[in-house]
Image (spheres, helix red, strand yellow):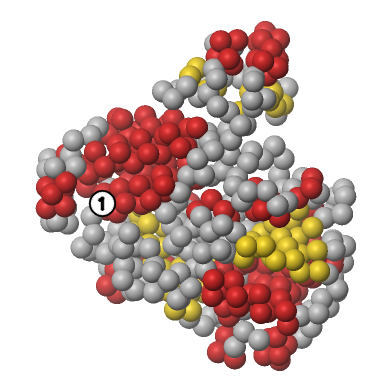
Amino acid sequence: MSLLPPLPDEIDIHPGPALLDGIERGPGLAAHRQQYDEPRASSLVELQALVEAVGLRGRGGAAFPFATKLAAAGRGRRALVVVNLAEGETASSKDSALALRRPHLVLDGAVTTARALKAREVHVVLPGDRPVAAERMRAAMAERNDAVRLVEHVTEGRFVSGQARAVVELIERRPNLPVTAWDPEAESGVKRRPTLLSNAETWAHVGLLVLRGAASYRLRGTTSEPGTTLLTVTTPGARPAVHEVAYGSRLRDVLPVSAAGSPGIVGGFHGSWATWPTLANALVSVPGMTSLGAPLAAGVVLLPGSSACSLQVTTDIVEHLAGQSARRCGPCFNGLPALAEAVRGLLEGTGSQQRVEELCGLVARRGACAHPDGTVRLVRSLLLVLTDEVVAHRHGSCTVGVSDLAGAAR
Amino acid sequence: MSRELRVDWPECRARGLCHELLPEIVQLDPWGYPLVTGEVTEDLLADARAAVRACPRLALRIVGS
């Protein structure tokens, strides 16, 4: 599919105000220690206060409060820490960007937390489908001499490999596929131990907090959402661009001029369609963008451009996602191909919207992981936001004037 | 306390016994997989427990919330 970057490791990484400040000095440990001192040891209480002071939320997509996870992992048996660099969402490249340019900030966050939790191991989960980013992180791990052991794992590199439970399975040396989570990982994860599993960006924020303190962190962003966030902006034919922006800034500032006027998908292949006016007026904010119907999730903005039909793009993505099912959960491996066919029916003007909605209802929340839910989110957002496109195709045309696409398929 | 019937999806193989034993709250989807349509109320608890025990894949649990 044209929206998939040919080499996901090839990313345009723009310098930013906090996490991506000073990246021109290179990713090595010496350069990192010139910019930041050695992190001093924190107690669990201090660390808890630090992440609470800035309301740190997980950056993997669910925006779950990190302090809640940390508190859960601090109770009970000896915890372990997991850095997830799998970045299952194909359109996201921010964790790869950190592996390539800021690996030690990520590791400082995870190692300091592991020590506060008295954990003995930090498990680093590398993406099997992004070898350059994986190699850079591996090199960074080899440069360090930490009081905790860094253990490497490599995912199988499919869309669902990065799901939390699939990662727990991988660490326990079982197939890297999602299983049912009866308890949160922070309570019972790897070998039923409390497992503090977060993605690379979350750990980089923890690293920055530990190294620079909460007051410095709060200099950016808004009172209710301090700090910055990473965004991956993807346009067809171009390398994905990773930007670091302060919360409360205008989303439009990181969108290419060429994207103006056309709808885009916020959140990635598991994301939501948003019209151009929504994108152009949006401020970067977790609750703000959720209220616009376009949750930021893992911070992906996909811009297919003015020559792409949103229904064609959706069909392509849903067909791709149907092929990415782990084929373990019945409603997912039966339902997603059926949903893909029904969406193609809308594209070709022969299918019914009712059938699409019915299949969405049969697939959503009926799997071990969020793969079916994410796919349904994308389809439902199309029906809700780009109604005109669906209607146009029902009448054998297309709003972007490439009705030959639909015509050729008939 | 309300109780919910949860399916362990990767384990389920659409054998359908749960629907046979608990048709009040378990329908089957077009592919034969369970569609849980309601809570496990007090009067359904015994049948729900029977369904959990009877599942040949051990893919059902009653979860309190």
Under circle 1, the secondary element is helix
Picture coordinates of residue A210, whole percent (x, y): 75, 74
Q: Is residue A342 left or right of residue A292?
A: left
- Work out which quarter of the rendered image holds the C terminus of chain A and state it: top left
The quarter of the picture where residue B17 lies is: top right
Residue type pointed to by label 1:
Gln
Q: Is residue A255 visible?
A: yes
Q: Residue at x 81, y 69 (%)?
A: A149
Out of A245 and A81, give the one closest to the viewer. A81
Out of A390 and A148, give the one closest to the viewer. A148
Q: Residue at x 25, y 51 (%)?
A: A312
Q: Is residue A75 above or below residue A350?
A: below
Q: Is residue A301 above or below residue A164?
A: below
Q: Is residue A60 visible?
A: no
- Work out which quarter of the rendered image holds the N terminus of chain A and state it: bottom left
Q: Residue at x 48, y 64 (%)?
A: A92
The quarter of the picture where residue B6 lies is: top right
Picture coordinates of residue A302, whole percent (x, y): 38, 62
Out of A252 and A135, give the one closest to the viewer. A135
Q: Is residue A401 above or below residue A97?
A: above
Q: How many marks?
A: 1
Q: Residue at x 13, y 56 (%)?
A: A401
Picture coordinates of residue A162, whole percent (x, y): 58, 55
Q: Which residue is mark 1?
A: A312
Indicate the chain on which mark 1 is placed. Answer: A
Q: Is residue A193 above or below residue A261?
A: above
Out of A354 and A280, give the one closest to the viewer. A354
Question: How many residues crowd mark 1 within 10 Å: few (<14), some (14–19), many (20+)?
Answer: some
Picture coordinates of residue B10, whole percent (x, y): 58, 35
